[in-house]
Amino acid sequence: MSDLWEVISDPHRRALVQLLADGEKSVSALAARFPVSRSAISQHLLLLVEAGLVTARKEGRNRLYRLHDAGALRLQKMFDTFWSNELDLLLTEAKHIHDN
Amino acid sequence: MSDLWEVISDPHRRALVQLLADGEKSVSALAARFPVSRSAISQHLLLLVEAGLVTARKEGRNRLYRLHDAGALRLQKMFDTFWSNELDLLLTEAKHIHDN
DNA sequence: TGAATAGGTTAGCGCACGCTAACGCATTTT
DNA sequence: AAAATGCGTTAGCGTGCGCTAACCTATTCA
């Protein structure tokens, strides 16, 4: 996979990114928030690492995941690139016409 | 499907949205740009319509698709919502530290 | 040292996606 | 009227995803 769009299109993975946005968290701490198994979350996290969105470090028997700055930046750039000039123009035009 | 994230995660559908951003186009005009069959493109377009990103009108034997303003707006809001305060904060911090 | 905890790994299942091929229906062209 | 064009629709195929279950390893606690 490793395509950023595909990676971010999964709801669980998006939620993981959001949860990690406010700091490092362990796998079980994360998994506790979801209705699926720890294994599923683990696999999602590995995908996020592969995609460069997240990094991991070991501390004792915990594995702590955190958001990777460079990855977040790539994500932002991806959105910006997609949101091309034409799309922006179209929207501002539309807003102007309907005046809201 | 009809989930905006899933809809926009497909490369062909993203390209369609971009192509439609600069104006109405017929199915064959669009399909000519892709290596897949017209049927595939047609199915993508129907999905985009279902998702509210695109509208269609008939003119003679052509079917003209165009971007739907409200849909584009929903898309923009979706990105913004995901790009929550934490993510933004994290990025601006990171930028500040590395000073670039 | 044994039990418990945290988490990676693998096999396999169900399922939905993207696609093609074939067909049908309007509309236009000759 | 007949042929051609534009496009939706459907069936069916291959493939990859998300998930669970089961197992294995490393670290901590008793």
Image (cartoon, coloured by chain):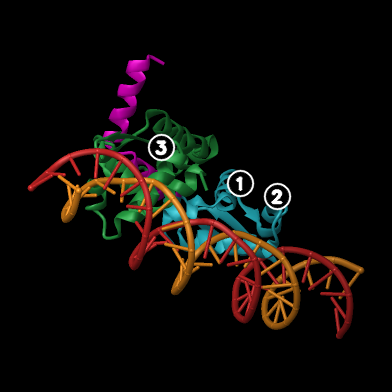
Chain colours: A cyan, B green, C red, D orange
Q: Is residue A15 left or right of residue B30?
A: right
Circles 2, 1 touching at the beta carbon (< 8 Å) = yes
Q: Is residue B53 left or right of residue A81?
A: right
Q: Which residue is mark 2?
A: A33
Q: Residue furthest top?
A: A99
Mark 1 and mark 3: Cα distance apart in space: 29 Å
Query: Which quadrant of the figure contains the C terminus of chain A?
Result: top left
Q: Are marks 3 and 2 on the same chain?
A: no
Residue at horizontal 33 percent and vertical 17 percent from the top: A96
Residue stretch in magenta:
A72-100
Q: Which residue is mark 3?
A: B53
Question: Mark 1 — on which chain does it sit?
Answer: A
Q: Is residue C29 left or right of residue D12?
A: left
Give the foreground label among 3 and 2.
Answer: 3
The image shows residue C20 at horizontal and vertical percentages of 33, 66
Residue at horizontal 59 percent and vertical 52 percent from the top: A12
Q: Which residue is mark 1?
A: A19
Say which quarter of the image contains residue D25. Answer: bottom right
Residue at horizontal 35 percent and vertical 47 percent from the top: B14
The image shows residue A98 at horizontal and vertical percentages of 37, 16
Query: Which quadrant of the figure contains the N terminus of chain A?
Result: bottom left
Question: Mark 3 — on which chain does it sit?
Answer: B
Give the foreground label among 2 and 1.
Answer: 2
